[in-house]
Amino acid sequence: MEYRCVECGGRMTTLFVQYSPGNIRLMKCGNCKAVADEYIECEPIIILIDLILHKTKAYTHLLYNVIDPQAPSFQGLLWKSTFGFLLLDAYRSLFLERSKEEWGLSMSFASLLWRFQKMLMDVVFGNIMFLSTFLLSMRVLFSTFPRPLRYKDLLLAIFISSYFKMFLVAMMVWECPSVIFIIDLFVLSSNTVALKVITQSAMSRCIAACFSAHVVKFLVTQRCWSWEL
């Protein structure tokens, strides 16, 4: 596994030396001379707060020093992240539709079936266009990378950095449709920071790639919900 210094991004062979259980010494980066990864000794809540604050050090720790692309569990993590990403998108679409029209027992079965069909189209087709636009933007905007990258690495970085979608669960008790679009903006900004960390490229290119993908997805989903029975 290739570790990275969270301060300068330099490569590390190891992040700490363990002398006994609970007794470790953090290694210093040979490039910047700072502690390579201070998050090793931090509580998960501290890491989560720094992720919410969009600190690149926290994203470097998560994407390089926690997730191992060579581990046997990497494929399972990718599938779980994909499932969670689509499930939260489905809930988002369902909530937006419920906010437009009142759902009740008086709805006919045909009308209910049509609404679920539109939601499925929204999630599946919208995300196909999102990923297609994102990967196309990567090929256009990023001709070369500082290190070899696989599409799996890029997709996992996008899925994991979309953790802000979990806040959609709060909509179960706090029905405020406008908050959904605020969450979408946080997801966009989080995706941008994750892409910058994983590609080590200019922020402007990362913004362009993520913004174009999210705009296409928004336009496609709006088109799906404009269809009438």
Image: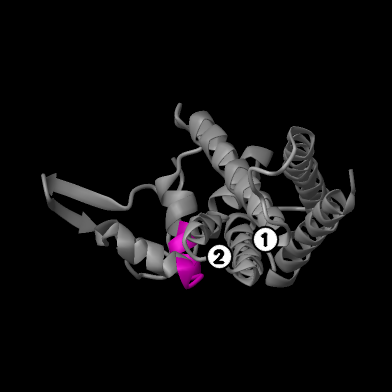
Three-letter amino acid code at disc 1?
Ser
> Residue 64, image x and y in percent?
47, 50
Q: Is residue 63 magenta?
A: no
Q: Is residue 8 visible?
A: no
Quadrant, the N terminus: top left
Q: Is 185 or 145 nearer to us in this picture?
A: 185
**Front in this rendered view, residue 6 or 118:** 118
Boundaries of the magenta span: 52-60
Camera-side residue of 190 and 72: 190
- Horizontal relation, residue 57 to residue 165: left or right: left
In x, y percent, where is residue 138?
78, 52
Q: Nearer the viewer, residue 132 or 21?
A: 132
* Residue 54 belongs to the span the image colors magenta: yes
List x then y, in percent, for residue 161. 55, 56
- Which residue does the image show at 64% across and 47% down from the upper left? 104
The amino acid type of the residue labelled 2 equals Glu
Q: For the residue carrying disc 1, how many other residues have a C-alpha within 10 Å: few (<14), some (14-19), or many (20+)?
A: few
Q: Main secondary structure of the magenta part?
A: helix
Residue position for label 1: 99
Q: Residues within 10 Å of mark 2 (few under 14, many from 20)?
A: few
Mark sitting on residue 175:
2
Left/right of residue 219 with respect to residue 124 in the rendered view = right
Residue at 79% over, 34% down:
110
Task: Give the CA distance from mark 1 to mark 2.
Answer: 8 Å
Q: Is residue 2 above or below residue 98?
A: above
| Quarter of the rendering containing residue 47 | bottom left
Residue 66 falls left or right of residue 186: left
**Contact (CB < 8 A) between labels 1 and 2?**
yes
Up/down of 145 relative to 9, above or below: above
Q: Name the residue rendered at 49%, 55% in the picture.
A: 169
Residue 226, percent from left and from top: 88, 54
